[in-house]
Structure formats: C-alpha cells, structure tokens
Image (spheres, rainbow, N blue to C red):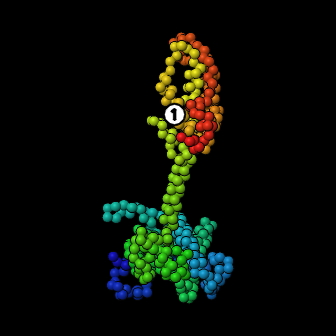
Amino acid sequence: MPKFHITDNGEPAPCNAQPGNCPKGEDQPHFDSEEEAQNHIETKMSSQTFSSVSKTNKDPLKNNPLLEKGFNADKAKPDNFDATINELESKKIAAQLEQDNQLSIINREYNERELVKTNGQSKYEWTKSQKEVLEDLKNDKSDDGQKLRDQLKEKATNLKKLERTINALNSKFVERGGWNRAFLATSGGDGHVHNSTDCSTCNKGKTPTQFQWMTNYSGSDEKSIVDDAGYRACTVCYPSAPIGDAKSLPTKMLSEEEKEKQIARDERKQKAADKAQKAKDNAPTASGEPLKIGYDTFKTERTAITSYADSEVDFAIDRAETDDDYRVNSKFLEDQREKNFIILKSLAEKRGVSIQEVQKELEPKVNTKLKKYNKTRNEQSHIEMINNIKHRNVNEAVYEPDDFGLSKEKYTTPPQEWND
C-alpha cells in the first residue's frame, strides 16, 4: 500500500517513490492512509491558525494552571508524577474530541454535500476541503462567524496547552533519569504488562495496542512489578520475569474493566451468600435446613406456622361440631396432629424454649383465624343458599393447646434438655 505525504498545496497525495527516495525529503511526514494525512493537516491548521498559546514562557511547568497547586516536577514522586501525566493525557483526548466536534460544526456551516457517482455507486461527498472551509471561516465577518472562530480558538488553545504541558513533563522524566514503569496491554486477550508502550511485542495489528498505565507502580523496582504482574509480566521488558499461567503465577494487575467484572462477581457471590443466609435464618429448624414431614417441605418458619395454625383451626372446629351425622377423617386429623407436634418441636429446638412456650407464641395467630371463622359460623353459606338448605348453628370454636401426651417435664422444657 502506498504511503501518503502532503503536497506544497497542503493536500494529501500518494507517495509513489521508493523508501528513502521521496522528492520532498524524508523529513516530510508520511502516513499510512489519506485519512491520517488529512487529519494531520486539519489539526495542524486549526492549531496554527487559531491557537494563541504564548511561546515566550521558558518553563511551561512553572505556575501552570493545568497542574495541581504545589506540584513540583523536579521533586514529585514517580507515582504522582506519572499519575499527573496520565490525567493530562485523558484531558488531551477529551480536548481533541472537542476540537474535532467544533471542526465538524464549522464544516456543516460552510460546506455542502453533492451526490457523486464512483464505479457505478452513488454517495454524498463534501464539496470543499477542510482548508477551504477554514479559509471561509476566517473571511466571515458576521457575528456568527466570529463566535465560531472564538469557539474553535478556545478549543485549539486548550489542546495546545495540554500538549505542551505533557511534552514538558515527558522531557522532565528524561531529565530526571527516568524510572521503572508498568503499562497493562488492554486490547485483546490477557494483556501483558510492559515497561513502555513501545515494546517490540506490541502494536503488531492494524491498530495500535491499547494500554492502561499502572501509575501506582511507577518507580517500583523490577521485582515488585514482576511479582505483582505475575504471568502477565512481559519477559522482553522485564528479563527477570518467570514464565507461567494465571494459575501458577496469579496477577494483581487488573484493568479497569476486569476490576468492574470482579466487583460484579463479588457482588453476585455476596448476594447469593446473603440469600442463603436469609433462607437459613428463616428456616424452621435449628440447623437452617428445610423441615420435611412426609410429603410436605417447609422452607420457612412462616409456612410451618401457617400450616400449624390452619390445623389447629380444623381441630377447634371439629371439637365445636355437635351434629350426630358429622363425620371426621380421624386418620387425617391424627396425621395433622403428628405434623403439628414435629413443627412445634422443631421451632422449640431452634428457639431453645419449650413446646408450651412456642404454643403461647403462636396462639394469637390461631385465634385470629378462629375469630374469622366464629364471625361467620352462623351465616348461611353460598352452597346452602343455592340449594335452599337450612343453616344449622355451630358452637364457637376455641383454641385448646395440645400437650401431645408429653410429660409435664418434657412439655415445659426445651427439647434439647429431654432425657429420652
């Protein structure tokens, strides 16, 4: 693929010369694509035309508003020094986007699209180059034109200041003799940790390798970096790094994305643990396990207590019944009675109290259900109304705690203290 350079007219053009024989000289920058060359032209023009950053300041780091108050580039610790550069780099990316957006606004204001047919395909293209658009902007004497110029100048100036500050800090890094750094490759797979972004193992694809600067390791000795990087330590950048995998050499260096995923995993685990603990706390057994009685399984105290209360209401209604023709399923009631005994005994074991005390605790719930029954016991039911059946009065149902044939000692003491 041919390289692109910039002509004397300020336009990108293919360079067909052999490497080293470009007539414009090898000092002329060359680009991999026409788009890269055009971006270079636009950025350079906007900066040169609209930036008013003073070049008279001999020390761009002195009294620089972009740096924290009290920051001393000559004495700052490596981690603080590099964290400052890293923060400025983030601001630079944002400033570049703001300038690009402003250029897009200006382009839409002074440019037009036309339908162009190429190789049988039609598409809309801008009729003017960025250079022509900027020239139109300079010649626009209206208030709107001045406003757009001021906005672009502000954004270009901000970007230039950030670039100058970053360059000055990088020069200061070299001046101070440099120190160990750690950069985690974040683009694709389990990235390695490198001591620079220029490692020979990086930037092999179509796009440059993306990095996360681990500034908290800046200035650390190689052993500390290698130990924490684990299997991720690049053996080219750190010759002392051993070879291993995530299991044999776990890493402490995680990208922000990996940290977020780890936090999400920990939250899910904690949520599951909390749910399991809640289920254990709510279980009707001392062990925290569900209570199984025949075909019934009670996972919570609430379901076990509801079953107990419903059965006690049935028992009370049965005792209140006086009709000679009334028949009960004695086997069913006996099974229910056995089930209630197991429920009370399990709750008593969990609470460390006697069956009698649990019955007293549950008595209000049983009585609430009985109150509802007693309120309607002498009212004609729907079935009776439909079939014109005369309603018969039923005695009031009363809750009578069952001692289940236990001795007084067992009935009034916790099950854990029974001597079977």
Residue occupying the point 60% across, 81% down: 77
Percent coordinates x, y for residue 141 in the rendering: 60, 70
Percent coordinates x, y for residue 336 in the rendering: 51, 30
The image quadrant that residue 66 belongs to is bottom right
Give the left or right position of residue 126, taking residue 308 as reference.
left
Element at label 1: helix
Please say whether residue 391 is visible from this viewpoint.
yes
Percent coordinates x, y for residue 280 in the rendering: 54, 47
Residue to which mark 1 is pinned: 339
How many numbered discs, if any?
A: 1
Give the left or right position of residue 317, taking residue 22 as reference.
right
Q: Residues within 10 Å of mark 1 (few under 14, many from 20)?
A: many
Residue occupying the point 54% across, 65% down: 105
Residue type at mark 1?
Lys
Residue occupying the point 33% across, 84% down: 18
The extreme left residue here reads 119
Relative to 74, residue 148 above or below: above
The N terminus is located in which quarter? bottom left
The image quadrant that residue 161 belongs to is bottom right
Please say whether residue 60 is visible from this viewpoint.
no
Relative to 191, residue 200 above or below: below
Percent coordinates x, y for residue 261 in the rendering: 49, 61
